[in-house]
Image (cartoon, grey):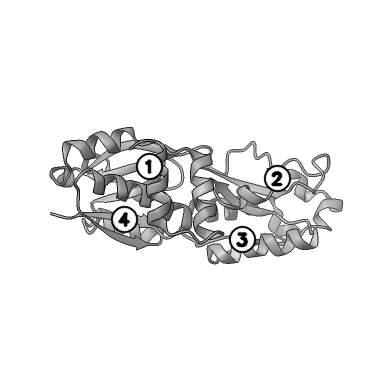
Amino acid sequence: MELQVGRIDLSFHHVAAAVVLVGLERAGVHCQLHTAPHEEMFTMYARGKVDMVVGAWLPASHGKYLIGMTDQTVRFSVLYTPYCLWGVPEYVPAGQVASVADILKPEVSAQCNKVIQGINEGAGISRFSRNVIREYGLDKAGFTFRSGTIADCTDAFIRAHEKGEWVVVPLWQPQYLFHSYKIRALQEPRGLLGGMDQACIILRKDALAKLTPRAVTFLKGIRLGNAAVTDMDYQYVVEGMPLDRIARDYLDRVCI
């Protein structure tokens, strides 16, 4: 029996899933990989088309997708502790822009790019960002959120950085941009960005029989951490290393 493993179609999810897949392979579990955007992936999970998701950001970002599935789900390890943020390049003076509210200062608003370029609509950061714009009244100051691909988001930031422009980027940790750029997270005291999540490996209880004892031990014990995922994301996206090599190198280093 093959274990049907799902991953969300973003690069850092790809690298985290690659590590888990190699670990499961070494533990004697045959897997078939499925990739989809956020909503579609959790719909597949709810319908039993995938047995496992690597990983679900709980409770804030992806919790709404698992409503009604708690009793049918087993959580294994917390791979890393992600969180959403709004960030600005470090060259934007902290004395002028330290918080989301500071964007509304006339002298700041006048310098900022008014388009906040995000990723796909189903992502937590996209839902959160639209809410931040509305709740802080940034829309009244001309700011808009634009959804798109991950490349749309990162490329918009890189272009602005190259020009020294003031730009707000809706991001998350871990993410490969933090490997190369100094990005300062803005304070958001209202909690509209969801706080810190746990990136969990989740499995349908009806698929437990597909795991070997060694696989269960692996799934309970594997930890990556934000820094490791950021580094592997950079290796994958920027350096172009194959996922399988990245995953095997990581597991060899941690002796798994």
Where is mark 1, residue-wise?
Answer: 251
Find the distance from the CA under tag 4 to the CA under tag 3. Answer: 24 Å
Residue tagged 4: 6
Q: Nearer the viewer, mark 4 or mark 1?
A: 1
Identify the amino acid type marked 3: Thr
Give the alpha-carbon distance from disc 2 to disc 1, as whole Å. 39 Å
How far from the left and from the top, in percent, is residue 200? 37, 41
Residue under label 2, please give it: 100
Label 1 secondary element: helix
- Relative placement, left or right, of 1 versus 192 is left
* Among the two numbered marks 4 and 1 on one chain, the one whose residue lies closer to the N terminus: 4
Q: Amino acid at mark 1?
A: Leu
Q: Quadrant of residue 38?
A: bottom left
Q: Tell me if I can see residue 71 in this picture.
A: yes
Residue reaching furthest right?
107
- Front residue of this view, candidates 124 and 203: 203
Looking at marks 1 and 3 on the same chain, the residue that comes earlier in the sequence is marked by 3
Q: Position of residue 52 (x, y in %)?
A: 27, 49
In front: label 2 or label 3: 3
**Residue at 55% across / 66% down in the picture?**
148
Secondary structure beneath label 3? helix
Residue 199 seen: no
- CB atoms at circles 1 and 3 under 8 Å apart? no
Q: Residue at x 46, y 42 (%)?
A: 60
The answer to which of 128 and 94 lies nearer the viewer is 94
Instruction: Give the alpha-carbon distance from disc 4 to disc 2, as whole Å.
Output: 34 Å
**For mark 2, does the 10 Å Cα neighbourhood hold few (<14), some (14 to 19), or many (20 or more) residues?**
some
